[in-house]
Amino acid sequence: MHINGPGQQRGHVLLIAGDASVRRRTVQLAPSANLAALAMVPASMLLGSELPSDTVYLDGARDPNTVLARLRTAAATPGPLLLYLSGRLTVDRRGRRLHLALAGTTSATVRYTALPWDWLGSELRERPAGLTTVLLDLAADKDAWPLLREYGSLPAPACAEVYGVVRPPAFATGDGAVSGYTRQWIDQLRHSPVRPANVQLHALAAGTAALPPGALVLPTARELALRPAPHQEQHQEQRQQQQAWQELPRPHPQQPVPGSAVSSAPDSTPTAAAAPAPGRDPRPHIHALASAGRHPEAAALARAWEEHVLHTCGHTSVEAIEWAEIRADLARMAGDFATATRLWLGAGQARLTREGAEDPHLQAAAAGALYCWTQLKDRAPALESGPELLRLLSALPALDPRYLALTRARLETLASPQHPRALHN
């Protein structure tokens, strides 16, 4: 599906605005405003690549086949791809299929005037892993929201890293301006001295966008390692590392995983000791396990590697901190936000103690802690970890003060005797 030769590799940015979300004649989500704001950001900054790139803005389309043609062209690019979608999710009532409503879509014309959501996966599925990012800023109408609650998520292309939010149908009215989530992405891109990784942008945007209660935050099972994304030329090396790791001999079924009290079972993970694999990186394999939903195996293997690093490099080493961060993200991928928050806070404090407040990775750790803390649904763990999160955020001299203000406000709300036991944000 390559459209350019090897020496002409290009990136592609495709920005699509669907139909606006309107409630009681008030615009709640204005996709056109979001696209207009993104149009002011350089394509290289949006894409996170210095490769020459093509940018396409698709606003006001009424024919799903027009959008499909643009998707097909974008999917054919051999380089990195950013696909941004903003608009209203709706449902074909007859087939119960999710669609992105386009301009002019009504409940009676969904099948003919809206973009079937599964077309995204169909068009992107042949792309190589690691080259595709899908960014979503959506609102679900009253027909789509029950289906999303049934799914527990929003179906996403398997080959892509997907970040975004979906607002419920009854969220507070807005003014038709740029939405908070997209605005936070843009602000971070403009104000950060070095472009953050997409996962860092997502963590900060979702944590500070004042999302309505019950909003769906994506993803739930994709890689969210809070570190700079690999350059294009590293993808092949990572695939080779993953293949090499998968080819390592498996331990005997009764052999314990090194550094862990958990015993290996048949068809379980490979041994985690480094001496079988000098110079090999186990992280691609661990991520593959977590992405496949094999969270206990991924966590056990990561814990084993962390124990090995603790014994060989020391508890305060950079390597030990990095493995704590990996375990934090694995916990997030498994939906264990309490453990993820605790681990991110520990990693952040360790970086602060070792390198000081200027450590470029410290903000990533703080962003991870903030994001996971905002996902806690039970009051007790949120109250327990909130003060430590405040201390960590307060130690960052370049932190946007809004993050501190929002964290303090939420912590005060949690501490109120009238606050319910369970959270719904």
Image: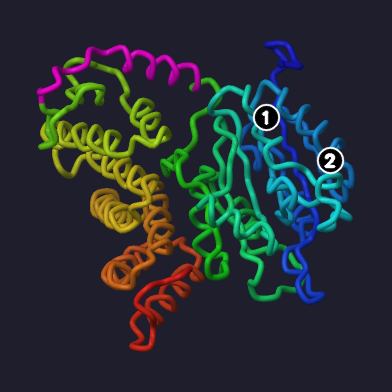
Residue 139 appears at what percent x and percent y? 67, 60
Of mark 1 and mark 2, the one earlier in the sequence is: 2
**Considering only vertical position in the picture, is 392 above or below 55?**
below
Q: Is residue 147 magenta?
A: no
Q: Nearer the viewer, residue 115 or 13?
A: 115
Q: Residues within 10 Å of mark 2 (few under 14, many from 20)?
A: some
Q: Which mark is residue 64?
A: 2
Considering the image in quadrants, where does the N terminus appear? Answer: top right
Q: Is residue 238 magenta?
A: yes
Q: Nearer the viewer, residue 166 or 32?
A: 166
Q: How many angstroms separate mark 1 from mark 2 (CA)?
A: 14 Å
Colour convention = rainbow
What residue is rendered at 82% in x and 38% in y? 67
Residue 149 appears at what percent x and percent y? 54, 57
**Considering only vertical position in the picture, is 410 above or below 134?**
below
Q: Which mark is residue 122?
A: 1
Relative to residue 242, is residue 46 drawn left or right? right
The magenta segment is 235-255
Q: Are marks 1 and 2 in contact (CB under 8 Å)?
A: no
Identified by mark 2, the residue type is Pro
Residue 132 falls in which quadrant of the image? top right
**Considering only vertical position in the picture, is 130 above or below 139?**
above
Residue 262 appears at what percent x and percent y? 14, 35
